[in-house]
Image: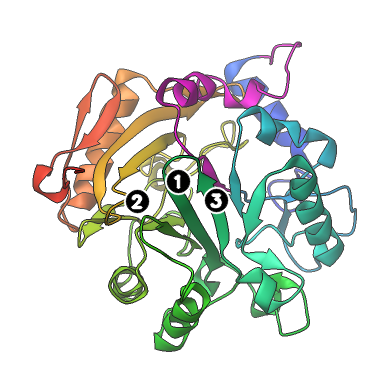
Amino acid sequence: MIATNWRGIGDANGYVELARKKNGPLPGDRDAGYVWGDALAEFDALNPDLRLINLETAITAHDQPWPEKSIHYRMHPRNVGVLTRARIDFCALANNHVLDWGYPGLEETMETLDQAGIRHAGAGLDRGRASEPVNLDVPGKGRVIVVSMATPSSHIAPIWAAGRKTPGINLIGLNHRWLEFVKERVANKKHTGDILVISIHWGPNFSHEISPHQREFARRLIHDAGVDIVHGHSSHHVKGIEIYNGKLILYGCGDFINDYEGIPKSPERSSFAPHLGSIYFARVSTENGRLIDLEMRSTRMHRLQVRRGTGEDADRLCDIYNQEGAKLGTRFINEGGVLSMRQPSLYPKER
């Protein structure tokens, strides 16, 4: 990663050094699974059918950053084992960092994921391929169809949008025109038993606000386009969760792995608890796509590794979900570090 404009820090080593100063030295025997830490055991314990993430970085050795952009993220292709170690099935690429190293960096990112056997969507060599849904087979259960998209509200320049014959990301607007575009992309693709997921990068950092346009667009995706889960991301902290027509809307999942732990934060930014994250385990009905249950495991970054959240961490996250959920009609409880929703009427029983 290169960060060119934060108190003189010029590359990722500076962030590593800040983390060391705050929490002590890193172990010398780190492997590809190190950054996932306790999350690997959580994944194995619940054994989800699919593991979907927003990959907010390029995977490239290309060394020409996008001009006039202050922060550039990258992971070397040799480190793609970080993703395969966690058995990631899918990466959403429509975000504000996948093009940090230009079009060559984007192409190398996609090629690296292809070689690793990791599916991806949201970026491509033209608009058709950038907006193409990905079908993920779940043996014995059906398919999950995923579309990745982003909006300019997450600090994405219009020039990053894929064109008819030019590479880029699936950049959309929150209006009727783009809703129709989404409907066209998934028309005749979703069949009985399929689950349709929209993974969307939207909204500013460090704000719990969910704009009326976001909320209306998420609901119309469900009502008009047959979407079953809206997987929202961009903010560096968790945001409110809504259930609409029995379908799950995650407006902002927060960060999960990052290198920010040593950066001093203002009291205002600290109030968002950006050092805390959640693992979201959602179970939905293959009959109608409605949410059956949602569990979240609290996490925190420590020595650049995901650790289980403390009891205090889980309480704080639960408070945030409830504070923001009060505006959206959802409520959560914390049982031993496992956060779950408490609105049983929303959860139809599978037949």
Nearest the camera: 124 or 334?
124
User: How would you rate the neighbour count of disc 3 (Cα within 10 Å): few for under 14, some for 14-19, many for 20 or more?
Assistant: some
The residue at the far bottom in this view is 177
Q: Which residues are magenta?
A: 25-54
The image quadrant where one finds the C terminus is top left
Answer whether residue 234 is visible to the viewer in this image.
no
Q: Residues within 10 Å of mark 2 (few under 14, many from 20)?
A: many
Q: Which residue is mark 2?
A: 239
Q: Nearer the viewer, mark 3 or mark 2?
A: 3
User: In this figure, which residue is indicated by the disc labeled 3?
Assistant: 136
- Label 2 close to label 1 by CB (< 8 Å): yes
The circle on residue 254 is 1
Q: Judge left or right: residue 66 versus residue 207.
A: right
What amino acid is at disc 2?
A: Lys
Find out whether the residues at labels 3 and 2 contact each other: C-beta distance under 8 Å.
no
Nearer to us in this view, 317 or 41 = 41
Does residue 143 show up magenta in the picture?
A: no
Task: Inspect the magenta stretch and tell me whether residue 42 lies in it.
Answer: yes
Please tell me which residue is depicted at 44% across the width and 33% down the height of the picture: 48
